[in-house]
Image (cartoon, rainbow, N blue to C red):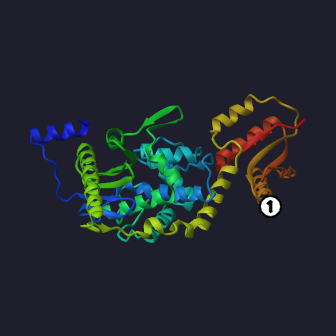
Amino acid sequence: MKFWKVVLGLMLIVGITPAWAGISTLVADTKSGFILKSDNATEKKPPASLTKLMTLYLTFGALENGILKMDDRLPISEKAAAQPKSKIGVVAGESITVKDAVLALIIKSANDVAVVVAEALGENEEQFADLMTRTAKGLGLNDTVFKNASGLNEEGQVSTAKDMAILTMALIAHYPQYYELFATPSFTYKGQTYNSHNTVLQQYEGAEGLKTGYVSAVGYNIISTARKGDARLVSIVIGEDTPLKRDLRAMRLLDQGFHQVDVQRRAEMSGKLKSAFNPLNRRAFIAKPPVQVFLPLMKTCWQQSQKKLARSSVPQKTKKKVVAAVDTAVEQGDNWSIQVGAFEGEQKARQTAEKAISILGAIGKEIRTPQVNRFFRSRIEGFSRNEAQKACQRLLKGTGWQCFPVAPQG
């Protein structure tokens, strides 16, 4: 007997009956779109971290269309680093790969990483949330409004069990190659391993994963998918009062759903019944992904975020580490340079160097803009080693620019 069935039996024996009233549930066949069973499925409630499913849907769209690659690095802002738990503790001024970001959202439900992704693809979280809502409308999620990328409680952010089922079906249909990542049991970031706490994935036979969530305003939520034979179901639970009850309910819904699929198929084969269930909005998993409309905007925002990273060849170095690197460098003459950025356009590189010269009062210093790959380095020549070090310290302290000394070449 499965673990969850044993636990449910014990709950009933000791008189612990789940509080079913007011909880939204739904189980549906992802292939046909038929709703097999539902309760309060159109009631609007805070989606909590189920919100991150749309954050991931947009990320997968960017990956599918070549805007992002899994090994690209996303810049981390102070806002992202300051997000409350659940988080992986990203550090402002550093960066994280797209792959690690995706796994952090799926496995750890990391709020800090949700903001990192939002700022990379939407310039800021508010604009990204607007893209999320507009994409939702394009999928037929008519009762869903997103206000942020993480699911942290915010006034006006709502969805329904029905809409979350449609979103799940759209994700499976449009991005099947990334859907498989939801079954990942763990990932490691900066030496720390994070394990999935999705009990349904661990305990239910045929489970393929997906997303859990919690906010005090609604309770514990979960989206689960599972497959038996050629049938794949999605179950939604929104508003349970404990994680255990949430998980047990989700698994019971899947059991009921698979049983109904068997009944339905036998009835259809006998010719006695053509359709016993109501279909969801099928355009969600048949039509062209609405994210296509927003690709130009996401591409522009992504390019802007990359420029932020490119302003320093050592974006993950702290001020102390930059100074330490200078202290241990081998001095090679007096013609040292300082680098104050790297840009796709040579004019921008030169303008930045000119601004740095003005700030430093370094009149007479020579500007160089050597090109490396597709970026022009913004450099100022004519310093001694000690002067270069002090100039960078001054810029770091006064402007926050990621300046660093460059030793003479040859």
Horizontal side of 259 relative to 31 (left or right) equals: left
Estimate the x, y position of residue 178 in percent, counting from the top left: 51, 51
Identified by mark 1, the residue type is Gln
Q: Nearer the viewer, residue 198 or 326?
A: 198
Residue where numbered disc 1 is placed: 347
Q: Quadrant of residue 299?
A: bottom right
| Residue 26 visible at all | no
Pinpoint residue 269: horizontal percent, then vertical percent: 30, 61
In which image quadrant can residue 332 be found? top right
Which of these two is toward me, 245 or 346?
245
Q: Residues within 10 Å of mark 1 (few under 14, many from 20)?
A: few
Q: Residue visible at 87% across and 36% down?
A: 334
As displayed, is residue 382 above or below residue 262? above
On the image, the x and y values in percent for residue 248 come to 24, 45
Nearer to me, 158 or 363: 158
Residue in view at x 52 percent, y 47 percent: 101
